[in-house]
Amino acid sequence: MITNIDIDEDLVAEAMKVSGARTKREVVDKALRDLVARSQRTRFRDIWGTLKEEDFWPDYDPKTQPGEPPGMYRVEQPVASYKARPAVAAQARRTKK
């Protein structure tokens, strides 16, 4: 499609420098594609409150390095190797009458 449009030359030159485009047509095409792609992305405000923490990183551990198994540095309470008796409730004291 052939269209004549009046565009700021300095802006086009800067966009060509930044994007690495070789022609004006290429830079305009890239800008239009980026605009359409950006409009189709999900916005954060649209998903606010609908996701849970588990949906993002179920095994996230901030101490692990990339490539290490998750939970490598996680600290957990060890399981007792013996049977413990339940705590005895303190007996009520007798009061003098």
Image (cartoon, grey):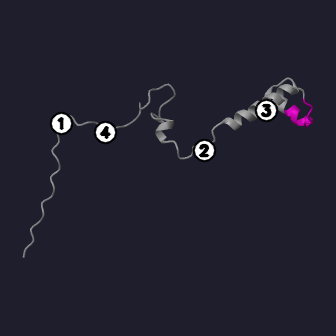
Query: How packed is label 3: few (under 14 Cα within 10 Å), some, or many (20 or more)?
Result: few
Q: Which mark is residue 46?
A: 2
* Above or below: residue 79 compared with residue 85: above
Q: What segment carries the magenta color?
A: 3-14
Circle nearer the viewer, 4 or 3: 3
Residue 8 in the magenta stretch? The answer is: yes
The amino acid sitting under disc 3 is Leu
Q: Tell me the element at label 4.
A: loop
Compare residues 85 and 8 and report the one nearer the observer. 8
Inter-mark Cα distance, 3 to 2: 24 Å
Sort mark 1 into few (<14), some (14-19) or many (20+) by Cα contacts within 10 Å. few
Secondary structure found at label 2: helix
Disc 4: CA contacts within 10 A as few (<14), some (14-19) or many (>=20): few
* Residue depicted at x 34% and y 38%: 76
Mark 2 vs mark 1: which is more N-terminal?
2
Residue 39 picture quarter = top right
- Mark with earlier residue (3, 1): 3
Residue 67 picture location, percent across and down: 50, 25
Callout 3: SS: helix
Q: Amino acid at mark 2?
A: Asp
Residue with the mark numbered 4:
77
Q: Earlier in the sequence, mark 3 or mark 2?
A: 3
Residue 73 spot, x, y in % from top left: 41, 33
Position of 54 compared to 48: left or right?
left
Residue at the image position 87 percent from the left and 27 percent from the top: 24
Residue 19 placed where, x, y %? Answer: 79, 28
